[in-house]
Amino acid sequence: QERGISADRILIKLATTWEGVQAAKILEKEGIHCNMTLLFAFEQAAICGAAGVTLISPFVGRIMDWYKKDRGVDSFTAAEDPGCQSVKRIYNYYKKHGISTIVMGASFRNKEELLELAGVDRLTIAPKFLEALQSSTDAVET
């Protein structure tokens, strides 16, 4: 604030580890917003919501990558994509329980993942996917 920047304009990015969540609790109580990243599991999202963090960034593509390797498959449809399923589960849990933490899907591997998650709070979209979405005629369901 000494430099003319309001605390509500700051978003601190922290890893979703036990220590990161503890730090986020303190920062959020002081009015500093936090974005929890490196989030791969529902349990991580649940503790972030309970901690009152501003925003979480589940890594959709990285979750899918792990499952592809684990199951020995080349791909998943967007509806079957474990990363997409994870984000939907988190989003629905937050809404059902009145948790105000924003869900912002991140680390996408394809346009179809983005279309599958249309309607969640926020998505981080790389320029190559913005171009693909712009030229797409696929239906978008929310």
Image (cartoon, rainbow, N blue to C red):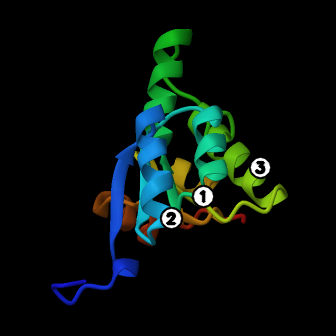
Q: State whether residue 105 is above or below residue 44.
A: below
Dot 3 or dot 1, earlier in sequence: 1
Residue shown at 50% from the left, 41% from the top: 60
Q: State whether residue 92 is above or below residue 118.
A: above
Q: State whether residue 94 is above or below residue 33.
A: above
Q: Position of residue 8 (x, y in %)?
A: 40, 80
Label 1: element kind:
loop
Dot 1 or dot 2, earlier in sequence: 2
Label 2: element kind:
helix
Identity of the residue furthest to the left in this view: 3
Query: Relative to 10, is 110 on the left or the right?
Result: right
Which residue matches tag 3?
Answer: 93
Q: Amino acid at mark 1?
A: Gly
Residue shown at 72% from the left, 43% from the top: 89
Q: Residues within 10 Å of mark 1 (few under 14, many from 20)?
A: some
Q: Amino acid at mark 3?
A: Tyr
Q: Amino acid at mark 2?
A: Lys
- Which of discs 3 and 1 lies nearer the camera? The answer is 1
Query: Relative to 125, is 82 on the left or the right?
Result: right
- Which of discs 2 and 3 lies nearer the camera? The answer is 2
Mark seen at residue 29: 2
Q: Position of residue 128 (x, y in %)?
A: 30, 58
Q: Residues within 10 Å of mark 3 (few under 14, many from 20)?
A: some
Q: CA distance from mark 3 to mark 1?
A: 14 Å
Write down the quadrant of residue 99 in the picture: bottom right
Label 3: element kind:
helix
Q: CA distance from mark 1 to mark 2?
A: 9 Å
Which residue matches tag 1?
Answer: 52
- Which of discs 1 and 2 lies nearer the camera? The answer is 2
